[in-house]
Image (tube, grey):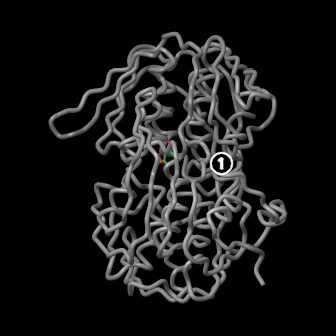
Amino acid sequence: MTQFAFEKDPAELYANALSSRKSGPLNGTVRIPGDKSMSHRALMFGALAEGETMISGLLEGEDVYNTAAAMRAMGATITKGDDGLWRCFGVGLGNLVEPTEVLEMGNSGTSTRLLMGIVAGHPISACFTGDKSLIKRPMGRVITPLEEMGATFLSRAGGRPPFAMRGSNELKGITYKLPVASAQVKSAILLAGLNARGTTTVIEPHPTRNYTENMLRHFGIKLNVERNESGEDTISVNGGQTMLGCAVDVPCDPSSAAFPVVAALINEGSEIKLPRIGLNDRRIGLYTTLIEMGANISFENETTEAGERIATLVVKSTGPLKGIDVPADRVPSMIDEFPVLAMAAACAEGTTTMTGLAELRVKESDRLLMVAEGLKLCGVKLEMGDDWLTIHGTGKPPKGGATVETALDHRIAMSFLVLGTATQDPVAIDDASPIKTSFPNFIELMTELGADLDLPA
Ligand code: S3P
């Protein structure tokens, strides 16, 4: 990776509206920030464990900072050293202290839902709130099982934040079949189960990301995972175990990598390399889909670290992608990637259909609606239903020339900036600030690859 000098004022670019212009081929090797899901878990588990946890590669984004602040407010010591490593000095399972202030979760659903599970297993009260996006998001899906275990909640309608909760050190283990494919709900229940009496079991009809299970094992927790005849996973954990601090090396985030990958694919002649991308098999649905669409993506220097597959993504653009039908059972493995896939589909030749997308409506924004509205403004032909989207591509990037609303959603913001690197006319977004929640150097990194991002003219 070469040394790169960024000449614009990043603070100004992230503060407001931003626009992207036709950029030509993207080239180079860049390091994507750390995996968001793993970064949250590393800090939370480090704060809960006994002794020291040392974390390298942590995502230094706003969502993760909110997790760190919450764990500090409940008694853990979390520091960043001059060596760039983060260190957590944990309190030991069951020993979190009651936060004296409201826990401010900002934009982060993962912080909120996983912390609800952690607080549930402690005899403390906590109040949670967040930004205008988070307070619209349904927490009932986590409140229902945690109440069954013995925690109590007082929330706005539909379990929406702000809410107050009271945990207990006498929760009871439950068996709970997930009504939605959600790693956050699964994780919240398992984390509450760490401090519950007996065994807590989650039945997962559709496999979702398993970082909670993998990383808990790394911290010394024993879990039992079995797959039954119908393909459902049953994950069980016994309460009362000991968690021990350890070293965690966070790989680079495959969901963040998706933005430069799609930008490279829609700008002919591009060739980019993204080292150390985490390729957990429950996260790679987008890459499988892009390869089916004809993308030239290869995985080099493959290794396995702490049970996680890691590789360098090498992406070459050799011509337009082809539209395909994305199978609904692939949705959990690419749940965060549909906005950027839609941008690829808008430039592809032929029709792309995406089904089983109900969960997209309850993410940081109603992503199905925001994608459809934004693409229509950019001149793309499409149809949308309650949980599906069909995009008709012409084999050429659409016209662009629109300003798209991002509704505090980082992935909507980055997706449309990616599209604008290939459209005839620039694409602007009304607010670039949410990008910092998950990809704090997105503008610098995309510019280094050759994307033309700037304040709107
Ligand atoms: C996450 C799980 C997913 C994903 C989110 C991160 C996690 O949410 O969309 O960005 O870290 O567990 P759901 O569990 O709600 O699908």
Residue 187 location, x and y as percent? 47, 34
Look at the picture and state if 182 lies above or below 52.
below
**Residue 242, image x and y in percent?**
52, 10
Extreme residue toward the left, this view = 229
Residue 432 is left or right of residue 216, and the answer is right
Q: Residue 231's spot in the image, x, y percent?
A: 21, 40
Crowding at dot 1, Cα within 10 Å, few <14 / some 14-19 / many 20+, comes out as: many
- Going 39% across and 63% down the picture, which residue do you hit? 357
- Residue at image point 28% right, 55% down: 329
Q: Quadrant of the C terminus?
A: bottom right
| Furthest residue toward front | 2
Residue 385 visible in the shown view: no
Q: What element carries label 1?
A: strand
- Write down the quadrant of residue 84 in the picture: top right
Task: Give the x, y percent position of residue 206.
Answer: 31, 45
Tell me if the residue at label 1 has its CB under 8 Å from ligand 1. no
State the residue at coordinates (50%, 32%): 146
359 or 146, nearer to the observer: 359
Amino acid type assigned to the residue bearing label 1 in the image: Pro
Residue 105 to residue 233: above or below: below
**432 sits left or right of 322 in the view:** right
Task: Determine which residue is flagged by label 1.
Answer: 161
**Res 81 seen here:** yes
